[in-house]
């Protein structure tokens, strides 16, 4: 849509048909900020209305989303019901907005993507669905692609100077653009099993029923990105306004091996059964009509060896992926969209564009490596909740720094300030600290010593009081003023 507004003639090719199921549903303050800026910069005012829960409900209640007040984490022990103390020693709640009106959202992607595609058509984008790209060829003299599209009725040829691969997978570019995707170098090793459910009980009701203290919660955790840490990995729960729940289980390398022969539903059930509180929560759960099945992935971590070439470039989710922990996906994609739009501005000449593409590639690799370190240290420490919470704070430091820069009117060069030397050093040093620990043998006092080092490290950027022991893991006010 933004390219159309800039004067380009744009053709959008989708091999599926909207509305269709898609994963990647939890937005963040960064995603919302970028949406607002795209709305202003490219005269796409409706995007602004999707950037805050209140405005979304006032303007587009028909497009289903859910309220996402923050990030909530609960530590479960195998074979035991969830327990915590009055200081919330197994819970961490971090508010990302101060109220429901300004809150982030969980996107029911089938609805949101359908809405966006309709808007694209209204804006003048030429849209083909249920269409496969059958063949590509490029005339180097004219610098033009011939793209052969196969629909159910016919084969059609489209000519274009540029291809933007927004397919969210390495498949297309490896088939047609001679790229390779690999997992080497990633510290994180995870795979996922996920689906949508109906009739899943509310976690807050469960906690209250069990007499756990919730009176000082900054928000209702059912309306947040709800994470349950388990031995095998972690589970996400994202609730939508139609009471559907997106839930997925991330398995670390050893759990993935252990359950590799099982069908996804069996793995899901057998793991949930080992955590009594989660079992209680899912007791009446039914799989939703869409997608009507459990979906199982292989290892999620992947990276393309090139992200651009002559007349083509890929979006971040095509370039690579780490893991859903910290909900980086939508924001990361939007940050890539923002950069590519600048690069395609008609005032940018060929030579400048080439340089910008190179820096886009460097940026993508630097960002993927930072996301990997942030996620990996959390996986490593998830059995030691205090240390896990400290690692999570490193993500919040990077993301708050990024938000503050945007609010000051700057657009940081890299997502999560991955290229900011001091922020990067904080992330690298924290990861190295965790990697050098023998996590199975740490005493409580050693853990406290390690946490002190984290607290000291983030001090120069800690403007919102993260890691303040007096807050008992309940953060009411980390959100930057919107
Ligand atoms: C298990 C999991 C959980 C996630 N959870 C989160 C989360 O909570 N929050 C978050 O922000 N992100 C999350 N993500 C990441 C998120 O899914 C992506 O960042 C986001 O979907 C990227 O959007 P996209 O439009 O680039 O790609 P996609 O959403 O993948 O869309 C690509 C589109 O291209 C179409 N397509 C594919 N191949 C072709 C082809 N050859 N020809 C034509 N069309 C094609 C597809 O049908 C699809 O419509 C998660 C990812 C995974 C794997």
Image (cartoon, helix red, strand yellow):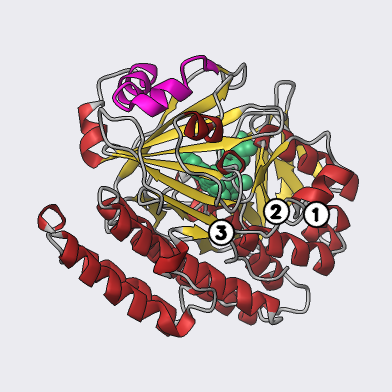
Q: Closer to the camera, 77 or 109?
A: 77
Whether the residues at callouts 1 and 3 have beta carbons within 8 Å, the answer is no
Q: Is residue 12 left or right of residue 15?
A: right
Q: Specify whether residue 159 is painted magenta.
A: no
Q: Specify whether residue 267 is painted magenta.
A: yes
- Per the model, the C-alpha gap separating discs 1 and 3 is 17 Å
- Per the model, the C-alpha gap separating discs 3 and 2 is 19 Å
**Mark 3 — residue?**
332
Q: Closer to the camera, 342 or 267?
A: 267
Residue 334 against residue 264 in the figure, above or below: below
**Mark 1 — residue?**
47
Residue 223 against residue 163 in the figure, above or below: above
Which is more N-terminal, label 3 or label 1? 1
Image position, residue 48 (x, y; %): 81, 57
* Residue at the (24%, 41%) spot, across then down: 253
Asked which secondary structure carries label 3, the reply is: helix
Asked which secondary structure carries label 1, the reply is: helix
Q: Closer to the camera, 213 or 5?
A: 213
Which is more N-terminal, label 1 or label 2? 1
Q: Does the rendering let one see residue 121?
A: no
- Per the model, the C-alpha gap separating discs 2 and 1 is 15 Å
Quarter of the picture for ligand 1?
Answer: top right
Image position, residue 337 (x, y; %): 65, 61
Q: Does the rendering let one see residue 194?
A: yes
**Mark 2 — residue?**
103
Residue 102 placement: quadrant: bottom right
What secondary structure characterizes most of the magenta part? helix
Q: Is residue 290 left or right of residue 373?
A: right
Magenta part of the protein: which range? 264-286
Image position, residue 107 (x, y; %): 67, 41
Q: Is mark 3 within 8 Å of ligand 1?
A: yes
């Amino acid at each position: 849509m933004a390219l159309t507004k800039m004067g380009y003639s744009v053709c959008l090719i989708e091999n599926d048909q909207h509305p269709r199921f898609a994963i990647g549903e939890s937005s963040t303050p960064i995603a919302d900020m970028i949406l607002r800026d795209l709305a202003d910069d490219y005269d796409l005012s409706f995007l602004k209305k999707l950037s805050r829960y209140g405005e979304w409900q006032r303007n587009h209640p028909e497009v289903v989303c859910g309220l996402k007040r923050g990030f909530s984490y609960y530590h479960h022990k195998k074979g035991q019901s969830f327990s915590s103390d009055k200081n919330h020693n197994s819970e961490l709640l971090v508010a990302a907005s101060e109220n429901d009106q300004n809150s982030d959202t969980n996107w029911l992607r089938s609805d949101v993507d359908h809405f966006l595609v309709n808007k694209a058509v209204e804006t003048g984008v030429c849209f083909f669905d249920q269409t496969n790209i059958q063949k590509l060829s490029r005339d180097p003299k004219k610098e033009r692609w011939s793209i052969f599209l196969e629909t159910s009725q016919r084969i059609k040829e489209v000519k274009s100077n540029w291809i933007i691969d927004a397919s969210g997978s390495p498949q297309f570019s490896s088939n047609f653009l001679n790229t390779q995707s690999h997992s080497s170098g990633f510290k994180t090793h995870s795979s996922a099993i996920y689906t949508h459910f109906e009739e899943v009980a509310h976690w807050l009701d469960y906690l209250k029923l069990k007499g756990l203290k919730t009176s000082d919660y900054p928000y209702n955790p059912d309306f947040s990105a709800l994470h349950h840490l388990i031995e095998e990995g972690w589970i996400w729960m994202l609730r939508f306004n139609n009471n559907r729940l997106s839930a997925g289980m991330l398995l670390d390398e050893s759990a993935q091996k252990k359950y590799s022969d099982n069908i996804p539903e069996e793995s899901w059930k057998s793991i949930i059964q080992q955590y009594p509180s989660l079992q209680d929560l899912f007791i009446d759960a039914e799989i939703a009509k869409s997608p009507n099945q459990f979906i199982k992935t292989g290892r999620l971590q992947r990276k393309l060896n090139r992200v651009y070439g002559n007349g083509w470039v890929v979006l971040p989710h095509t370039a690579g992926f780490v893991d859903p922990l910290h909900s980086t996906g939508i924001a990361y994609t939007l940050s890539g969209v923002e950069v590519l739009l600048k690069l395609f501005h008609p005032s940018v000449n060929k030579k400048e564009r080439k340089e910008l593409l190179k820096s886009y590639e460097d940026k993508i690799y630097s960002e993927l490596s930072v996301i990997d370190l942030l996620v990996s240290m959390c996986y490593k420490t998830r059995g030691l909740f205090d240390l896990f919470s400290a690692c999570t704070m490193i993500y919040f430091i990077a993301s708050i720094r990024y938000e503050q820069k945007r609010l000051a009117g700057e657009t940081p060069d890299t997502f999560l300030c991955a290229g900011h030397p001091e922020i990067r050093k904080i992330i690298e040093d924290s990861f190295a600290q965790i990697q050098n620990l023998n996590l199975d043998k740490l005493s409580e006092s050693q853990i406290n010593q390690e946490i002190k080092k984290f607290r000291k490290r983030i001090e120069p950027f800690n403007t919102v009081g993260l890691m303040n022991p007096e807050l008992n893991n309940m953060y009411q006010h980390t959100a930057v003023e919107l």
